[in-house]
Amino acid sequence: MSLSMYEASVPVFKQLLVALDANLAKAEEHAAARKIEPDALLHARLFPDMFALIRQVQVACDFAKSVPARLAGVDVPTFDDNEASFGDLRARIAKTLAFAESLDAARFDGSEQREIVLRPGTPKEKRLDGKAYLLAYALPQFFFHVTTVYALLRHNGVEIGKKDFMGAY
């Protein structure tokens, strides 16, 4: 039996987003217990030219909603990038999960060959088949942003480990 594009995408996004949500809850508790201003964590960066934690979560959610949408052949939902608190970020994750979970697995059938066009009409336009889009582009991008959030939280003293990063599987 082969692995479907649905199985290779939606459950992976769900597992890591549920774990990310739990890690953000731990970060919020950490800040409150140590009387740390939440913005110190929310605006933390690994290096000045990298996105802050808030943006890392937003981009991870963007991948977790846009990739399944494109593979399923439906419109990508638009979310405003206006999150300013842990609660806001957790609400965005919940909204992303609700969207991904609403997609029927049958809509993914044949998506490994579906052409995905990134940045259409720009000099950076790139065309990939669905399989390459998911495996070589989208999942690595998603993991990068989720891992960066983990690293920011860990670096700032939030007591999380690999098990927290991975979540339930």
Image (spheres, rainbow, N blue to C red):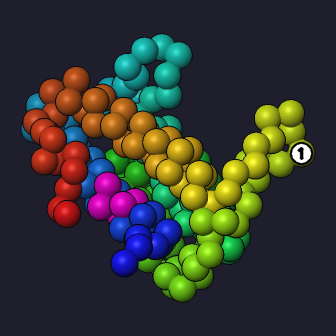
Task: Left or right? Give the position of 127 relative to 40.
Answer: right
Q: Which residues are magenta?
A: 12-16
Residue situated in front as seen by the camera: 8 or 80: 8
Identity of the amino acid at label 1?
Answer: Gly
Indicate the secondary structure of the residue bearing disc 1. loop
Q: Quick one: quadrant of the N terminus?
A: bottom left
Q: Quick one: quadrant of the C terminus?
A: bottom left
Determine the image quadrant of residue 162: top left
Q: Residue at x 86, y 39 (%)?
A: 122
Determine the image quadrant of residue 2: bottom left
Residue 140 image offset from top left, x and y in percent: 46, 42
Instruction: List the single residue furthest toward the top.
Output: 48
Residue situated in front as seen by the camera: 162 or 134: 134
Residue 15 image offset from top left, x and y in percent: 30, 61
Determine the image quadrant of residue 36: top left
Please say if 4 is above or below 138: below
Instruction: List the single residue furthest toward the right.
Output: 121
Residue 75 image offset from top left, x and y in percent: 70, 70
Task: Left or right? Give the position of 20 relative to 27.
Answer: right
Residue 144 image offset from top left, x and y in percent: 42, 37
Identify the main secondary structure in magenta.
helix
Residue situated in front as seen by the camera: 160 or 121: 121
Q: Is residue 31 visible?
A: yes
